[in-house]
Image: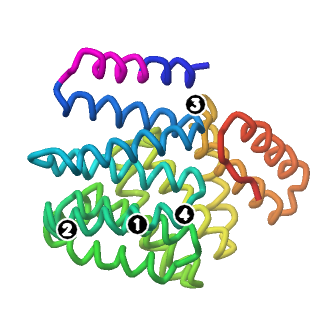
Amino acid sequence: GRGDKAVAIAEKVYRGRVATNAPLNDVLVSQRLYGNVLGRVGKFEEGDRLLSDGLRIAKGAKPENNETTLSFMSELCGLRGQWGHYADAIVVCRELLGFAESAMGRDSLSASSARQLFSGALYNVGEHDASATLLETDLKLMIPKFGEKHYTVLWTMSGLARAYAELGRAEEAKPIAEKAYYGILEKYGPNFPFTQDAGLGLAVIYVKLNQYSQALGLLEQIVVATDRRGGELNIRAKRELARTYSLMRRKDDAEKMILAALKDAVNCPNTIIS
């Protein structure tokens, strides 16, 4: 499939640069890309090994390239989260945030991205209070500098709303999630993955508030929009749509949707259907 082709291309580029003694930064860029692609096709152990090695090399470079080091840390944190190795992801994310704040500044985009990754790792292990605190801090730092319509602020709002919802604060989460979703929608359109992910987060909050018709419209739209490319977001949307159908006593629709999600999950590594 396309995943195998992507791995083959990324490997060829990486090994070619190593073999020709290309400049170190060029080698590291291709190494990071290769590790990223391996993670995307579910070859997490290989990807982790490649990214960890690249991070070690980047840290030891003289002079150290802060952007390269940050990129490897971010990729490694994301891969370990996808892999389900959340505790290991938290270790890297904590280091990433410290490095980003020190090297680039607390109110930098790099630091904001690090807080988002770190909060996501904490969210995945049920540390919703800590996740929310990180994102609240991010908004306090980023809104004065970039305003409420900047993409990093909107994405932080979406994450904060999810954390609040898990803390039993769905009413408080709803306007934040709506502001995030409609802001991203206006900026990037309905087919952008971040728009769809923010919409999914908003739909989950609607369900928690028993606002099923509002959730249904969003979820059906996201499933249709993501069906062609498939992937983890599409499967999560189908899972939430199945739950919404079930809560609305649409048993046949719920069964069809969960079966579709299960079928798609076979071809999507490390996707959990619950």
Per the rendering, the mark at residue 229 is 3
Which of these two is toward me, 233 or 203? 233
Going by the numbered disc 4, the residue's amino acid type is Tyr
Q: Amino acid at mark 1?
A: Phe
Whether residue 129 is situated above or below residue 62 in the rendered picture: below
Residue that numbered label 2 is attached to: 101
What segment is highlighted magenta in the picture? 10-22
Upstream in the sequence, badge 3 or badge 4? 4
* Mark 3–mark 4 CB contact (< 8 Å): no
Instruction: Residue at 48%, 56% (x, y): give it.
Output: 198
Q: Quadrant of residue 247?
A: bottom right
Say which mark, if any, is on residue 118: 1
Q: Residue 251's spot in the image, x, y percent?
A: 90, 55
Where is residue 54? Give x, y as percent.
33, 42
Which of the two discs, 3 and 1, labels the residue nearer the N terminus?
A: 1
In the rendered image, residue 181 lying in the magenta stretch gets the answer no
Instruction: Say few, some or many: other residues with alpha carbon within 10 Å of mark 4 (under 14 / 14 to 19 / 20 or more).
Output: many
Q: CA distance from mark 3 to mark 4?
A: 26 Å
The image shows residue 260, relative to residue 59, as above or below, that is above
Question: Which of labels 1 and 4 is toward the front?
Answer: 4
Residue 146: x and y in percent read 17, 63
Amino acid type of disc 2? Answer: Glu
- Residue closest to the eye, 148 or 270: 270
Q: Taking 271 as reference, is 112 left or right?
A: left
- Residue shown at 25%/66% (left/top)? 148
Which of discs 3 and 1 lies nearer the camera? The answer is 1
In this rendering, is residue 33 above or below 82?
above
